[in-house]
Image (cartoon, rainbow, N blue to C red):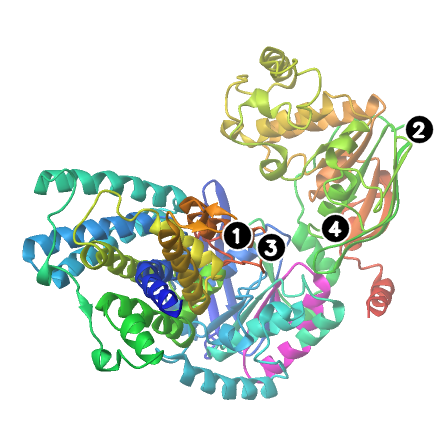
């Protein structure tokens, strides 16, 4: 491709990797010059983490190979990668929590059968590294007592201690506060000055623009573009990440929204690490409308669905549904929310929507299994369940129409129909629906979309969360955009186009507000 | 009174020895993340192999070799099921216990035709008690003499070995590279894998050590403590060792004291048999024998401190799908 005389620090040639039916990486090529910070950006599920796991020897590529400093190397396991000078800071830290920092750093690089000597040399070496890269840390502290930012520092030290010249950071700021993130980027600058090559994986545009020299964009398992960071823009990257897809169209009439069925007031949620995942969400959902939530995946949409459906408690705020007020102090669980005529189609049907080992007729009553419709005095009424399942399979065109087939054996689209049918046929007032057509084939998509519109026309309120922009634009009457756990914009579907939404999703209109938020959490 | 106490402690040492060996065996396995409910089966299998070997070749040491081999073989089956094939640790362990309980009796009937026992061992075919130097000379010195010649001297070599294994294990676990990796793999195997170390290899080595120690414990039962193999002679020692391991919070020195406590209760139960206590009457043996388990349950329920096991215990290691 190039006749440059200095070899690249790392070069990937046509890497492909497949997991069963999923093509996680396809013909990936990448060239990273030594001593640069190279960003790899893409939505969740674009295949970034898989690619990095291949470089670090966690998975082996099906085809393709890797060159380090111009030499082809075979990486079968992490030890091979370490030997080639590659270090990795994983998204979920690979630390032994009840070990000291020192023990974690020397694990795998003990320098002898007895620990004593290795510990002493490591102590000296760590002090040197800490000074050189401003990575101060108490080496005798127990890792689980350290805040997340410092735990990450341990991971970086681990890689450097093993002599890493190429450092991969996988979504490093996901768990950090803005201050910790800023400190991390200062560390990356120091690393770069010392000639370390950094690969930064993220889905946050701001980080890419602020700290990288070059950037590559991944979408659906493929590298779709390489850019010099200085010569690109937020807008261009956002567009490349989301991509232009075949436009879906759904025939629907003008919405006629009426009563407010659900209203969220100032809802916030903190996760276990104390990071604010939802930031003061306000939204209203009216009968007879579809409200779409757009956003790059991982910006709080899942948390919002979980809070609204009662799966996770909120930390602050109020939720008004069917005349009831739900707060952090007076929460309702998922079953109680269902009792308020609110149905929920979860984003991940395998994890939350179905029990894949169940037969279809059993999966078709999950969540409503205590209903008197399905229960006799002691036993469940299997005949009613099976008859109803047969009827639904006919109405929704589920194939094959066999109530006794295990749900795992249906295709994605048919599994999704089973889940949606289950929720919709309970005749709810409110339907929360997450990624309704993820992994669903085109024919089924149309069918599912029609059903959603039909439900709206019968006066129900629908909240749609999807990472597919086309789907949001085709179905929604109103579009709300989420970024970093907050609602950053709202617009009428008629005024929405891909470019505007893409910019809103990247929060390009809200630079000032972003700065303010940073100040706030300080 | 003092003499009675010394005699009871002497008995405690003898009863505790196989418990210590088995509990330390379990410590290696469980610290590496492998639940080992199969300690019992390994002890029983080794007891039989050791007695059979000693009976045929007339040497306790050859018997010990057979016992260790049998036990390591069983440990490797457990490893193959749990590590290589990511099976359920409990199921594999219980299967080993069940198979061994039946197989030992069957083989012994076939080979020795003595109703499931092995021939009675004598002379070199048994580990006999070792008299420590000057034990006889010091026997008459008050207090110290009794402690030295009665309590410390006069045990067989495997008892001393069992007690020596405690500092040895402490050293191996906390001071060596192998120990660091062993502890890490039981806590977070992903961290070990990404550090470039094979999770399976560490766990297999832990199970080999586990097998060796259980093998010694089994050989002790049939060739030192007794003079031959009897049906089901391990009599729940493996389970009690597991209880001691939990009671000692998976750490070598506390595990030693847990074993001594359980051993002492066992010695007490034997001593109390048929003895009337003023005001209470005869205490049923079972009431004392059940104490180790009751204590362990209380510990697990959080009444006595807190028992936190290795975090990754019992979970097969599967590389995450990204």
Q: Which residue is mark 2?
A: A258
Q: Nearer the viewer, mark 3 or mark 2?
A: 3
Distance between mark 4 and mark 1 Cα atoms: 20 Å
User: Magenta part of the protein: which range?
Assistant: A186-215
Q: Earlier in the sequence, mark 1 or mark 3?
A: 3
- Residue A256: image quadrant is top right
Figure check: A258 above or below A100: above
Figure check: A244 above or below A95: above
Label placed on residue B322: 1
Question: Of all residues shown, which one is farthest toward the left?
Answer: B57
Foreground residue among B256 and A59: B256
Q: Are marks 1 and 3 on the same chain?
A: yes
**x and y percent of residue A82 in the render?**
43, 71
SS class, disc 4:
loop
Q: Which residue is mark 3?
A: B303
Q: Chain of mark 3?
A: B
SS class, disc 1:
loop
The local crowd at label 2, few if under 14, some if 14 to 19, many if 20 or more residues have their Cα within 10 Å, is some
Distance between mark 3 and mark 2 Cα atoms: 59 Å
Q: Nearer the viewer, mark 1 or mark 3?
A: 3
**x and y percent of residue B270 in the render?**
35, 52
User: Is the Cβ of the residue at disc 4 closer than 8 Å to that at disc 3?
Assistant: no
């Amino acid at each position: 491709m190039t006749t440059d005389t200095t070899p690249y620090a790392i070069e990937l040639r046509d890497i492909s990797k497949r997991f069963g039916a999923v093509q996680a990486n396809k013909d990936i090529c990448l060239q990273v010059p030594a001593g640069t910070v190279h960003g790899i950006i893409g939505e969740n599920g674009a295949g970034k983490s898989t690619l990095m796991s291949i470089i670090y020897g966690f998975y082996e590529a099906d085809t393709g190979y890797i060159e380090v400093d111009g030499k082809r190397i075979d990486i079968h396991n992490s030890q091979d990668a370490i030997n080639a000078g590659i270090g990795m800071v994983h998204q979920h830290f690979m630390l032994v929590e009840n070990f000291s920092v020192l023990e974690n750093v020397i694990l795998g690089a003990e320098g002898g059968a007895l620990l004593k000597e290795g510990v002493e040399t490591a102590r000296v070496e760590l002090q040197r590294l800490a000074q050189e890269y401003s990575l101060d840390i108490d080496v005798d502290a127990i890792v689980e007592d350290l805040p997340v930012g410092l735990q990450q520092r341990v991971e970086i030290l681990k890689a450097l201690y093993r002599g890493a010249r190429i450092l991969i950071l996988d979504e490093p700021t996901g768990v950090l506060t803005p201050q910790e993130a800023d400190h991390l980027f200062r560390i990356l600058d120091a690393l770069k000055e010392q000639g370390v090559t950094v690969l930064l994986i993220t889905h946050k545009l701001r980080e890419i623009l602020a700290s990288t020299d070059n950037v590559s964009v991944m979408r659906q398992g493929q590298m779709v573009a390489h850019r010099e960071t200085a010569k690109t823009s937020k807008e261009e990257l956002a567009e490349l990440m989301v991509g232009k897809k075949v436009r879906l169209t759904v025939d629907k009439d003008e919405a006629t929204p009426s009563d407010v069925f659900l209203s969220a007031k100032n809802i916030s949620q903190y996760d276990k690490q104390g990071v604010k995942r939802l930031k003061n969400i306000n939204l209203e959902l009216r009968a007879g409308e579809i409200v779409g939530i757009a956003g790059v995946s991982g910006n709080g949409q899942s948390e919002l669905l979980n809070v609204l459906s009662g799966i996770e408690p909120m930390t602050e705020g109020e939720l008004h549904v069917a005349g009831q007020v739900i707060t952090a102090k007076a929460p309702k669980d998922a079953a109680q929310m269902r009792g308020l005529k609110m149905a929920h189609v979860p984003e991940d049907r395998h994890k939350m929507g179905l029990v894949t080992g169940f037969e279809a007729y059993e999966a078709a009553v999950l969540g409503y299994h205590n209903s008197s419709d399905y229960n006799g005095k002691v036993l469940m009424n299997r005949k009613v369940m099976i008859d109803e399942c047969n009827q639904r399979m006919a109405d929704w065109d589920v194939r094959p129409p066999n109530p006794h087939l295990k749900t795992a054996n249906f295709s994605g689209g048919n599994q999704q129909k089973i889940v949606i049918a289950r929720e919709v046929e309970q005749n709810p007032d409110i339907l929360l629906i997450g990624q309704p057509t993820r992994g669903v084939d085109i024919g089924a998509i149309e069918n599912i979309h029609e059903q959603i519109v039909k439900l709206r026309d019968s006066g129900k309120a629908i909240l749609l969360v999807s990472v597919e922009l086309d789907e949001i634009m085709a179905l929604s009457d109103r579009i709300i955009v989420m970024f970093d756990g907050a609602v950053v914009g709202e617009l009428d579907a008629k005024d929405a186009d891909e470019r505007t939404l893409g910019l809103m999703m990247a929060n390009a209109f809200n630079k000032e507000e972003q700065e303010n938020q940073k100040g706030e959490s300080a | 009174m003092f003499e009675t106490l010394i005699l009871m402690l002497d008995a405690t040492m003898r009863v505790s020895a196989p418990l210590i060996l088995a509990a330390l065996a379990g410590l290696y396995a469980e610290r590496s993340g492998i639940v080992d409910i199969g300690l019992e089966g390994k002890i029983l299998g080794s007891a039989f192999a050791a007695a059979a070997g000693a009976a045929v070749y007339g040497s306790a040491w050859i018997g010990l070799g057979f016992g260790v081999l049998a036990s390591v073989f069983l440990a490797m089956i457990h490893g193959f099921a749990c590590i290589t094939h990511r099976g359920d640790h409990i199921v594999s362990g219980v299967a080993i216990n069940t198979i061994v309980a039946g197989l030992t009796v069957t083989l012994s009937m076939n080979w020795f035709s003595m109703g499931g026992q092995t021939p009675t061992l004598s002379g070199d075919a048994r580990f006999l008690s070792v008299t420590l130097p000057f034990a006889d000379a010091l026997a008459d010195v008050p207090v110290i003499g009794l402690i030295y010649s009665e309590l410390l001297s006069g045990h067989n070599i495997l008892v001393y070995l069992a007690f020596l294994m405690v500092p040895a294990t402490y050293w191996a676990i906390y001071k060596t590279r192998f120990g660091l990796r062993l502890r890490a793999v039981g806590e977070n195997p992903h961290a070990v894998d990404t550090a470039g170390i094979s999770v399976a290899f560490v766990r297999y080595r832990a199970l080999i050590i586990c097998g060796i120690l259980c093998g010694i414990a089994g050989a002790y039962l049939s060739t030192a403590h007794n003079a031959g193999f009897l049906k089901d002679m391990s009599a729940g020692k493996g389970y009690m060792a597991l209880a001691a391991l939990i009671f000692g919070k998976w750490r070598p020195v506390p595990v030693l004291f847990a074993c001594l406590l359980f051993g002492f209760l066992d010695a007490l139960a034997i001593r109390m048999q048929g003895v009337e206590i003023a005001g209470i009457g005869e205490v049923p043996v079972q009431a004392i024998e059940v104490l180790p388990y009751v204590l362990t349950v209380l510990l697990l329920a959080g009444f006595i401190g807190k028992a936190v096991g290795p975090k990754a215990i019992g979970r097969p290691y599967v590389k995450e799908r990204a």
